[in-house]
Amino acid sequence: AQSVTQPDIHITVSEGASLELRCNYSYGATPYLFWYVQSPGQGLQLLLKYFSGDTLVQGIKGFEAEFKRSQSSFNLRKPSVHWSDAAEYFCAVGAGTGTASKLTFGTGTRLQVTL
Amino acid sequence: GAVVSQHPSWVICKSGTSVKIECRSLDFQATTMFWYRQFPKQSLMLMATSNEGSKATYEQGVEKDKFLINHASLTLSTLTVTSAHPEDSSFYICSAPSGTSDSQYFGPGTRLTVL
């Protein structure tokens, strides 16, 4: 069975600083990996996804993530954080193929941005 | 992007009553929808897969007689929490994969409080 680990429960960064959120996965086959952001009162929003191909994927809002098979990681990065980025971030792995595959989520990382 | 709505966004009920939560795909059709449960400051746990025209598939440990799922049409899935108890209090989230893209879209969630 697949699993996702987000080691950092809570991270605080200053506005303008760089950000890296860690994600490690366990899956027997080629993983389908996702990063979602959850803001209060809003549904989860997809930041980016990796299915295959280039291991560095670009997403919305200036986020990017790098798939490293050797490390079973899919860390999320942003070079300069904005105060509006404060939210809960979830890494997820999809089982099987296609978008109708079941998602297994990590426990999330809460990002706090200080001004 | 595709939009998924949930109704109600917030509900309080007495112990022993049943509560129905609706999940709608507003601008696309979804033969499959997923229902998740999220405890405070925890990850999303997949409860079941809702299939249009057939029975839902429940994850291990989820009581199918307690959490009734009906996928009435290609744009509507409902989750009914029967004989609700305080331990059923949680945040329930649905998602639907969009056939025109390769992503799942999440509803904003329904917070259920059982007194």
Image (spheres, rainbow, N blue to C red):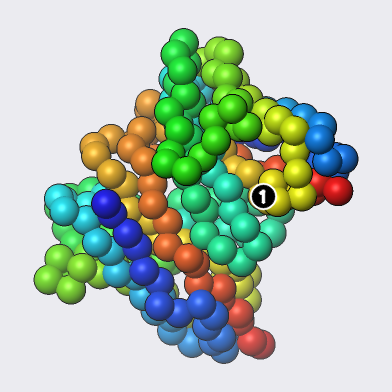
Horizontal and vertical percent position of residue A62: 43, 66
- For this rendering, which residue is in front, B20 or B68? B68
Residue A102 shown left or right of residue B108 in the figure: left
- For this rendering, which residue is in front, B7 or A76? B7
Residue B99 shown left or right of residue B63 in the figure: left
Q: Is residue B49 visible?
A: yes
- For this rendering, which residue is in front, A104 or B27? A104
Horizontal and vertical percent position of residue A77: 38, 74
Q: Quadrant of residue A55?
A: bottom left
Chain bearing mark 1? B
Residue B17 shown left or right of residue B82 in the figure: right
**B105 is higher (above) or lower (below) than A46:** above
Seen at 28% across and 64% down, the residue is A25
Horizontal and vertical percent position of residue A29: 15, 50
Which residue is under mark 1? B91
Element assignment for label 1: strand
Q: Is residue B3 visible?
A: no
Seen at 24% across and 61% down, the residue is A26
Horizontal and vertical percent position of residue B102: 34, 37
Seen at 45% across and 33% down, the residue is B58
Neighbor class of circle 1 (other Cα within 10 Å; few <14, some 14-19, many 20+) is some
Q: Amino acid at mark 1?
A: Phe
Residue B38 shown left or right of residue B54 in the figure: right
**A104 is higher (above) or lower (below) than B80:** below
Seen at 27% across and 52% down, the residue is A1
